[in-house]
Amino acid sequence: MFHCFFVSKLQRILVFCFNEFLNMVINVIGLGNSARRYNGKGISIGVNDCWSIHPCDYVVCVDKPERFNDEPERLATIKASKPILFFSHLDEWRFMNGFIQMNLASHRGDLSEIDTKYPYSISSSYCAVGIAYKLGAKQIDIYGVDMNDHKTIKDAIKDSEVRRFRDLFKVIQSKGVRVRVTKESVLSEFIKSF
């Protein structure tokens, strides 16, 4: 009787874990206003100094540390963060806890190598979506990638980045991954919002 109970309980645990894996949601946390809507549940991949908003499981940074020289509090937040893994293609971040050096695609926006290399563009958020896909997400919920008042991603650069996001979403959706974005994001024009 005890043996049957144990096996039954173990089976239920395994089924639960398997179902969780099958439905794995990974949250991408940018730095826009809608990032504050993230409730802290589930796996999270944040960008740059995301720990100023929420301590994320993983962090990605595509900018050199010097990029933050005019914003020392942001650099201090990045350096003080303790993610499980810290993703960057730059050796300058090698000192970070859990550093993973990303092997980037051949060129910006190249999605032909998405299964073997990390896709990249000008924003860390774009890379974070690619990392979520590579970690096996079945659904990617995106917070704080609003691009409504970003100080460097605007005008023609913003239009180009939005097109790259749209292309990235098409590719990962064709591979069975659901993607949702906050209604505050400009990306909600072509992707399901919440």
Image (tube, grey):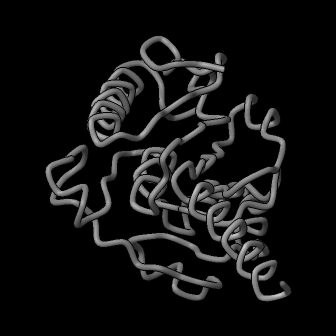
| x 48%, y 33%: residue | 179
The residue nearer to you, when weighing 189 against 122, is: 189
The residue lying furthest to the front in this view is 1
The residue nearer to you, when weighing 45 against 156, is: 45
In the displayed structure, 141 sits above or below 146; it is below
Q: Position of residue 97 (x, y in %)?
A: 65, 85
Q: Where is residue 26 in the image (x, y as percent from the top left)?
A: 59, 50
Quarter of the figure with the C terminus: top right
* Quadrant assignment, res 59: bottom right
Q: Where is residue 90 in the image (x, y as percent from the top left)?
A: 41, 74
* Quadrant assignment, res 122: top left
Judge left or right: residue 61 versus residue 174.
right
Judge left or right: residue 97 versus residue 91.
right
| x 68%, y 41%: residue | 31
Label tally:
0
* Quadrant assignment, res 69: bottom right
Quarter of the figure with the N terminus: bottom right
Q: Position of residue 49 (x, y in %)?
A: 70, 57
| x 25%, y 65%: residue | 117
| x 29%, y 72%: residue | 103
